[in-house]
Image (cartoon, rainbow, N blue to C red):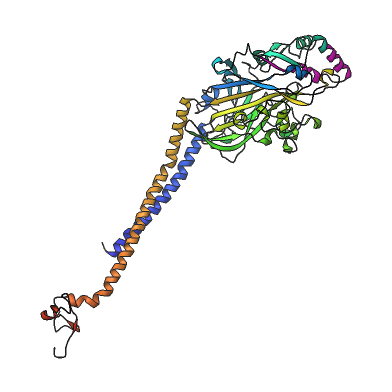
Amino acid sequence: MTRRSCALYVVGIACASMLVIGIGLTLSHVFRNIIHNRLKGEITLTEGSRVFESWKSPPPPVYMQYFFFNITNLAEVEGGAMAVLSQVGPYTYREYRPKANVTVAEDGMKVSAYCPKTFVFLREKSVGDPADDVVNTINIPAWAVMNKAKGFFKASAASIWMRGMGVGLYTTRTVAELLWGYEDPMLVSLATTNPEVEGVFGLMYKKNGSLGGEFVYHTGKQNFMDYGRVHTWSGQSQLTFWNSNQSNSINGTDGSAFHPLLSRDERLYVFTSDLCRSIFMEFEKDVTVKGIPAYRFTPPRAVLASKEENPANEGFCVTPKECLGSGVLNVSPCRKGAPVVASFPHFYLGDPKYANAVTGLNPVKELHQTFLDLNPTTGIPVRASKKAQVNIHIGRITYFPATRNLNDTIFPVMFINETVEIDDASAERLKKLLLIETVVSNFPLLIVGLGAILLVVFIILLLRSRRQQKEVKKIAFTKPLYASSFSPQTTAKDDSPYTAVGQKEKEDPQNGTDMHLSPLTSEQ
């Protein structure tokens, strides 16, 4: 191969390698866009989509755990002493939550559904039988009545009436009664004159199998970022419980679905009807669940922070005088005026004063944090834990002598832990989908790799070519000096001023035995 053809060969390799790399990078971008557009098209709440059936009937098992706070020194507490609490639980139920009355509307842009929940008790996952285990706790109906009785005459009459019926500030009930309801004599008496009053009270009363309010969701067909976002709840696109438009806004999904192609930098909103408001969650860390990569999102302290710490929360103050501190939310506006306060378990992320008002609480992040683990490619929840605590705001109430020894306290009653983790079959299907997406998206990178190999070959050949050129130049420089002494045709008639050495001179040990350069004499 001539020097010129070698150079053309090297240049050809260089051009081919750069062309292959360019094509690979272009195809990588194109293939990734194709995959992402396909995901956006398939992850929609429409008939025939990849996720619609699992959205209507979620296959992973959901578990609801209930923990109660038992007052161990009830007699002392009734006299005004600080309560000593012991946590009792869990009482675990399997939760079934298929959506009902699913209707697609507006040419596939919206879908409406009810979200009933059915609970089945699991004795093997519980500490005891809820029908047998008893708990000393706050008498929530009594506190609701006292908070409703405003003014001297109403409050005095209610106080005398409650004392006559033997209604106290605390009660002892079974776990099942506290959860699913019991007839309260005071409420039964009130119900005879006030149809709006239920004679039965329970923290989960009428929530086992009931439809609840209707949700209308965006399907994500028009914009994948709207996938699963709540449009209206119970016919409302804006709530009426709070004191600002921002606080009354219904933002985000219901927590069961999120748009694909999630980013670590975005803030996710979740509307929860239990809290009668929307909350937001932020990225915390990367996790892996059953071999599936996920982003963990958690609600930061700012969600339940005081108005001083987070001015945006001022709209959640019932009145300027009833604005609580960080870590708690007064939900009485959506609980018919009952003094119910929501928080995270053990007042996690709350002001220490709330946990210190009683004995027996110890907030721990690993036990009491709410989180969502979402696969960033599909937005599918692969693991989640929703934790919330029910508290009652107690203290001195005017014209109710029984409360005169009480301090202002957010008194914990119970907390829930609602958990879900993707089942094995769904996990395998999701991993296959992610593998296909990874292979197809990265296939053009193999072409880029091939181009890179060609480029390395080009560099090696180029270096080798330059080294050969240097060697050729060196030989060309030395050849005129030594060519005549090596030539067998050299004679006395040659024009060269040098001649071959005679045989005798060759053998001269002083001159060596290889060669000798000798100037011609004048005689020759």
* Residue 521 location, quadrant: bottom left
Q: Which residues are magenta?
A: 132-161
Picture layout, residue 164 above or below residue 249:
above
Q: How many marks?
A: 0
The stretch drawn in magenta includes residue 149: yes
In which quadrant of the rendered image does the N terminus lie? bottom left
Which quadrant would residue 331 be assigned to in this image?
top right
Q: Quadrant of the C terminus?
A: bottom left
Res 411 quadrant in image: top right
Question: In the rendered view, does 278 fall on the left or right side of 293?
Answer: right
The residue under the point 73% across, 38% down is 309
Q: Position of residue 442 (x, y in %)?
A: 43, 42
Specify whether 194 is left or right of 268: right
Q: Is residue 395 magenta?
A: no
Q: Nearer the viewer, residue 21 or 264?
A: 264
Toward the right, the furthest residue is 153
Q: Residue at x 56, y 15 (%)?
A: 123
Q: Position of residue 105 (x, y in %)?
A: 59, 26
Magenta: main secondary structure equals helix
Residue 435 place in picture, x, y as percent: 44, 35
Hey, which residue is sitting farthest left in the picture?
503
Q: Nearer the viewer, residue 146 or 427?
A: 146
